Structure formats: C-alpha cells, structure tokens
C-alpha cells in the first residue's frame, strides 16, 4: 500500500525515471572521478587524489616515518574497525566538500578530533619509548604526566616539517604517483606558458 504511493502517475513516469537515471549516472560518474574505492585502502597515494595534500605527501615521503607508517596509521583511529571507517567517512566528506566548494585553506591544520587521533596513535606506536613500567608502578600519575602533552609540542618537525603550505612546494613539485599512474601536478597549459616565457 505504502509502496504504491511512491509510484508517480503514469503521465509523469518517463520524466521521473529519466531524472532518477540522470541522478544515478551523475553519482556513478562523480564516484569514479573521485576514486571513491581508493579511500577504503590504506595507500598513501590516496591522499594525493586531491592536490591540496601534496605538501603533506611529499614531506611524509621524505621522512623516516615513510618506512613504518602510512597516513592512516597516524591520522585514523585504530581502536576498532567501525570507528576507523566512520572517521574516514566523516573526514572524507568534509575534505571533499571543502575542496569542491574551493574553501580549502592555504595551510592545512588538524581539527580537534584529528589532534586527539594523532596523539593516541603516537602513544600507540611509541608507547615503549614514552612509558617505563618501573616508573609507572612507582609514580601514581606517571601515565597522565607522560601523555597529557601533545607529542608535537616537542617533535614539531615530525614527519611533515614546519613549512606545509601549498606554496612551500613551489617549483619543486614532482610528478605524483596516484593509484598506479603518474599525475602531473602542474597543468599542461601552465607548463607550456612557463616554457614560452623562458
């Protein structure tokens, strides 16, 4: 009974079906171009699907963390499967919205949930360097005293360095690997204009 109410009158059915087809087609097209399935992986190249992340990708690629951690190892919760993918979905929708609306900042900074996640992951990976079981058993507030400050208050250069804006990569932008293919960061029209100028 309820389902019958959703079916449009016969004279409107071709228009409604055409409109639904256009919406489904547009959704599939956007999902394909945005490489939506790549966001299910932990591949760091996914982060440079959007060129705004180029400074973060390049600085990570030249850091020691490259050998042991991907972007998701630091920037996504690891307490359980559901919170990991819920965080990725929420963050991804926010990033996609900001990029689509051209509201991305020149210098990307972490919001509070991101800071809490990175701090938890620093302690998760470096727990044996932060904690000493002997001191932990002797000092009552030892754990709190060792983890209440953000790790990057001291370790500011790790792993992205201090200069992280889009302008920091300048002419040193390299061809980015994006999902197995090489992607030029500098548009061809700009590269041609630069060659003509020289």
Image (cartoon, grey):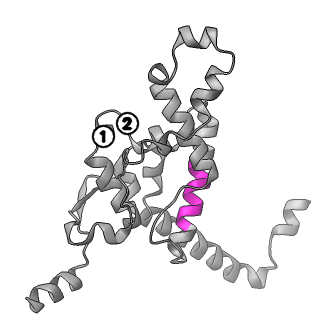
Secondary structure of the residue carrying tag 2 is loop
Residue at left offset 53%, top offset 42% = 118
Q: Of 57 and 21, which appears nearest the observer?
A: 57
- Is 123 situated left or right of 157 in this image? right
Circle 1 is placed at which residue position? 66
Q: To which quarter of the image does residue 78 belong?
A: top right
Task: Name the residue at the left extreme.
Answer: 198
Placement of the C terminus among the 4 image quadrants: bottom left
User: Which residue is at the front of the view, 59 or 18?
Assistant: 59
Q: Position of residue 194 (x, y in %)?
A: 15, 85
10 Å crowding of disc 2: few (<14), some (14-19), many (20+)? some
Q: Position of residue 115 (x, y in %)?
A: 57, 47
Residue at image location 49% in from the left, 63% down from the top = 31
Query: Magenta stretch containing residue 188, yes or no?
Result: no
Measured as percent of width and height from the top left, residue 67 is found at: 28, 35
Label 1 to label 2: alpha-carbon separation: 6 Å
The answer to which of 130 and 47 lies nearer the viewer is 130
Which residue is labeled 2 in the image?
69
Residue furthest to the bottom in view is 197
Q: Would residue 124 appear left or right of 79 to someone viewing this image?
A: left
Against 146, residue 76 (above or below) is below
Q: Please, what is the dominant secondary structure of the magenta stretch?
A: helix
Q: Nearer the viewer, residue 170 or 98?
A: 170
Under tag 1, what secondary structure? helix
In the rendered structure, which segment of residues is drawn in magenta?
88-96
At horizontal 38% and vertical 40% (from top left) the residue drawn is 70
91 in the magenta segment: yes
Q: Position of residue 35 (x, y in %)?
A: 42, 59
Considering only vertical position in the picture, is 64 above or below 108?
above
Quadrant location, the N terminus: bottom right
Q: Is the residue under label 2 in contact with that under label 1 (CB below 8 Å)? A: yes
Q: Which mark is residue 46?
A: none
């Amino acid at each position: 009974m309820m389902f019958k109410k959703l079916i449009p009158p016969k004279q409107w059915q071709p228009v409604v079906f055409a409109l639904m087809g256009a919406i489904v087609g547009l959704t599939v097209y956007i999902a394909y171009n945005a490489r939506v399935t790549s966001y299910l992986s932990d591949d760091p190249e996914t982060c440079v699907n959007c060129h705004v992340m180029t400074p973060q990708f390049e600085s990570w690629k030249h850091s020691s963390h490259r050998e042991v951690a991907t972007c998701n190892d630091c920037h996504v919760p690891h307490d359980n499967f559901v919170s990991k993918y819920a965080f990725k979905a929420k963050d991804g929708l926010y990033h996609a919205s900001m990029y689509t609306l051209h509201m991305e900042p020149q210098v990307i900074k972490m919001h509070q949930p991101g800071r809490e996640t990175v701090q938890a992951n620093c302690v998760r990976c470096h727990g044996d360097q932060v904690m000493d079981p002997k001191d932990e058993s002797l000092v009552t507030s030892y754990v709190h005293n060792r983890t209440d400050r953000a790790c990057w208050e001291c370790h500011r250069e790790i792993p992205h360095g201090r200069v992280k804006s889009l302008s920091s990569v300048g002419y040193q932008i390299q061809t980015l690997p994006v999902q197995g293919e090489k992607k030029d960061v500098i548009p061809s029209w700009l590269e041609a204009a630069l060659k003509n100028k020289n």
